[in-house]
């Protein structure tokens, strides 16, 4: 379940398998980054480019439509759940993490025009990507070159925009957006986020599986369904967190405390002066 992306207990847990594979390669990359940073950063950047290239070639070769719209067997098998097509966004995050680590939250002076332009570009990219999806809601066929570029560039561009938001907030230029994202409510939601992901499909299946008449996805109806399903998912995630995740976190915390105390006692014993009679 945590490694194989093709045979999953639950269909949506492919992400856990992909994420686990990236977690496995992270320690070697971090070791390399410490010893040879330029070589490692170049390697990671190259892997990101190759990931985008693989996505483009697979889309072109198998004549795959927009991966975010048409969930066919071909899309799922070759591009949607595969780590080599998902690696580009992870590589972008890795490179940005290195930049953020070296930046260390230092205040950055930006002219008003530069700051405003940065926010305009970031918001334009994100809104443009969301709106561009509407083009593919119409029945195809679509130009193959367009779908290949769409599949290849959508997620990397979105990731770069997110990195831009984080950097502006960390550097002291987040203003209203930073204040909003720093609200305490988000710290609570973040703790539930993983279990929301694990349980949301149960809420979806329960809600839509109980319909006895055809469903028509009007905007108002979709909004009502979204918030009701999200509320149900939060309740399930809270129960799941309290029942399984929190106890193990508490056990791990206690073990670390005991280990820390034992290490302190060993150090104290090693440094205890010996009085010779």
Image (cartoon, rainbow, N blue to C red):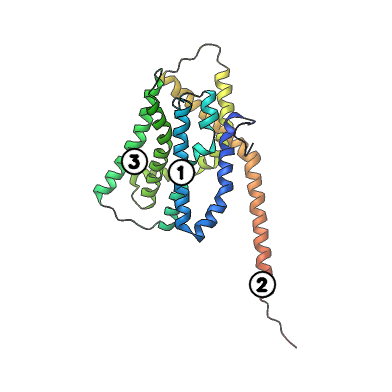
Residue 196: percent from left, percent from top: 55, 35
Q: Secondary structure at mark 1?
A: helix
Q: Disc 2 marks which residue? A: 268
**Residue 202, picture quadrant:** top right
Q: Say whether residue 239 is left or right of residue 127.
A: right
Q: Is residue 149 above or below residue 244?
A: above
- Pick the front one: 202 or 247: 202
Classify 10 Å Cα crowding around label 1: few (below 14), some (14-19), many (20 and above). Answer: many
**Residue at 50 percent of width and 41 percent of height:** 87
Q: Secondary structure at mark 2?
A: helix
* Residue 137 visible from this viewpoint: yes
**Residue at 35 percent of width and 52 percent of height:** 172
Kindly report the distance in space between the C-alpha atoms of the residues bearing marks 3 and 2. Answer: 54 Å
Q: Which callout, 1 or 3, points to the residue nearer the camera?
A: 1
- Pick the front one: 148 or 26: 148
Q: Which callout, 3 or 2, points to the residue nearer the camera?
A: 3
Q: Say whether residue 259 is left or right of residue 117.
A: right
Kindly report the distance in space between the C-alpha atoms of the residues bearing marks 1 and 3. Answer: 21 Å
Classify 10 Å Cα crowding around label 3: few (below 14), some (14-19), many (20 and above). Answer: many
Q: Is residue 114 above or below residue 270?
A: above
Q: Secondary structure at mark 3?
A: helix
Q: Which comes before the other along the chain, label 1 or label 3?
A: 1
Q: Which comes before the other along the chain, label 3 or label 2?
A: 3
Q: Disc 3 marks which residue? A: 122
**Residue at 42 percent of width and 39 percent of height:** 156
**Residue at 58 percent of width and 22 percent of height:** 206
Q: Disc 1 marks which residue? A: 48
The dot on residue 175 is none
Q: Say whether residue 181 is left or right of residue 263.
A: left
**Residue 180, picture quadrant:** top left
Spot the residue most to the right: 277
Classify 10 Å Cα crowding around label 2: few (below 14), some (14-19), many (20 and above). Answer: few
């Amino acid at each position: 379940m945590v490694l194989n992306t093709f045979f999953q207990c639950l269909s949506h847990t492919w992400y856990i398998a992909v994420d686990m594979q990236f977690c496995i390669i992270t320690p070697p990359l971090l070791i390399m980054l410490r010893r040879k940073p330029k070589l490692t950063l170049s390697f990671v950047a190259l892997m990101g480019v190759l990931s985008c290239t693989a996505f483009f070639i697979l889309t072109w070769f198998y004549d795959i439509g927009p991966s975010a719209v048409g969930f066919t067997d071909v899309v799922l098998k070759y591009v949607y759940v595969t780590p080599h097509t998902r690696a580009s966004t992870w590589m972008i995050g890795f490179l940005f993490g290195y930049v953020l680590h070296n930046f260390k939250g230092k205040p950055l002076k930006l002219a008003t025009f530069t700051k405003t332009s940065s926010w305009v570009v970031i918001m334009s990219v994100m809104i443009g990507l969301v709106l561009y999806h509407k083009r593919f809601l119409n029945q195809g066929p679509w130009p193959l070159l367009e779908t290949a570029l769409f599949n290849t560039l959508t997620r990397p561009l979105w990731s770069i925009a997110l990195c831009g938001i984080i950097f502006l907030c960390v550097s002291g230029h987040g203003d209203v957006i930073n204040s909003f994202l720093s609200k305490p409510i988000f710290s609570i939601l973040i703790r539930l986020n993983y279990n929301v992901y694990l349980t949301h499909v149960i809420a979806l299946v329960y809600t839509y599986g109980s319909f006895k008449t055809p469903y028509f996805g009007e905007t108002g109806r979709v909004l009502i369904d979204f918030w009701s399903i999200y509320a149900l998912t939060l309740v399930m995630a809270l129960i799941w967190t309290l029942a399984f995740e929190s106890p193990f976190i508490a056990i791990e915390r206690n073990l670390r405390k005991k280990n820390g105390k034992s290490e302190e006692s060993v150090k104290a014993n090693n440094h205890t002066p010996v009085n010779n009679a």
